[in-house]
Image (spheres, rainbow, N blue to C red):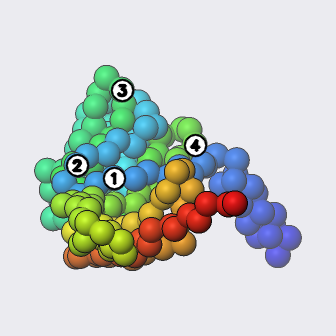
């Protein structure tokens, strides 16, 4: 029992010493690079399955349909890359360099916000200023005035159309006598 416990603790310690984690952010349709060199042998692993393998400097991709033609390895840098990103590519990838530590990459794939537009509904006070955007992941619209955020703010996880309005009133100044 002591041998099993000691082996278990040794494995946990080794994992903590020989692995690290990095965050990656990508945009749908673009490419990302896993910046940990694999030379001469190693692999790119997602959910316990090798999706890219390098053996003695020779690269081979997996037969998983989801990654077909999208996993690449640059022999000069040793970096793996994933092209034509999709939302469902988000997750944890491990790059293993044989005989060295492995590095985990937590990938989040975003849809970029598009078609942003600001409009004013009246030329006189009170008027409404409206800001709209279409598509996007984790979209946030906020109003700023002279570098300070206004209390109006909208945040959504996944958006097809987002809108934030602000009603402005003209300040009336009375001269002091």
Separation of residues labelled 4 and 2 (CA atoms): 28 Å
Farthest-out residue, front: 177
Q: CA distance from mark 3 to mark 1?
A: 20 Å
Q: Nearer the viewer, mark 3 or mark 2?
A: 2
Which residue, given by chain and number where applicable, does mark 2 sit on?
30
Q: Secondary structure at mark 2?
A: loop
Determine which quarter of the picture holds residue 81: top left
Q: Pick out the residue farthest to the right.
A: 2
The residue mark sitting in front, 3 or 4, is: 3
Q: Position of residue 150 (x, y in %)?
A: 52, 66
Identity of the residue drawn at 82% across and 75% down: 1
The label shown at residue 26 is: 1
Q: Quadrant of residue 29?
A: bottom left
Residue beneath disc 3:
77
Question: How many neighbours does mark 2 have within 10 angstroms: few (below 14), some (14-19), or many (20 or more)?
Answer: few
For the residues bearing labels 1 and 2, Cβ distance under 8 angstroms? yes
Q: Which residue is mark 4?
A: 101
Residue 32 location in percent, x, y?
32, 45
Dot placed on the residue nearer the N-terminal end, 3 or 1: 1
Compared across the picture, whether 58 is left or right of 43 comes to left
Disc with the residue nearer the chain's start (4 vs 2)? 2
Secondary element at image label 3: loop
- Nearer-N-terminus badge (3/4): 3
Mark 3 touches mark 2? (CB < 8 Å): no
């Amino acid at each position: 029992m002591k041998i099993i416990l000691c082996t278990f603790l040794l494995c946990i310690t080794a994992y903590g010493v020989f692995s690290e984690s990095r965050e990656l952010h990508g945009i749908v349709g673009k490419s990302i690079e896993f910046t940990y060199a694999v030379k001469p042998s190693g692999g790119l692993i997602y959910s316990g399955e090798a999706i890219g393998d390098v053996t003695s400097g020779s690269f081979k991709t997996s037969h998983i349909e989801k990654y077909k033609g999208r996993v690449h390895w640059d022999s000069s840098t040793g970096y793996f890359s994933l092209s034509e990103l999709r939302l469902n590519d988000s997750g944890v990838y491990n790059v293993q360099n044989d005989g060295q530590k492995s590095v985990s990459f937590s990938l989040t794939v975003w849809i970029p916000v598009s078609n942003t537009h600001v409009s004013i509904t009246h030329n006189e006070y009170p008027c409404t200023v409206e800001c709209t955007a279409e598509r996007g992941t984790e979209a946030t619209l906020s109003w700023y005035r002279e570098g300070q955020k206004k209390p109006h703010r909208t945040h959504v996880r996944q958006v097809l159309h987002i809108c934030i309005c602000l009603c402005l009133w003209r300040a009336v100044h009375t001269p002091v006598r």
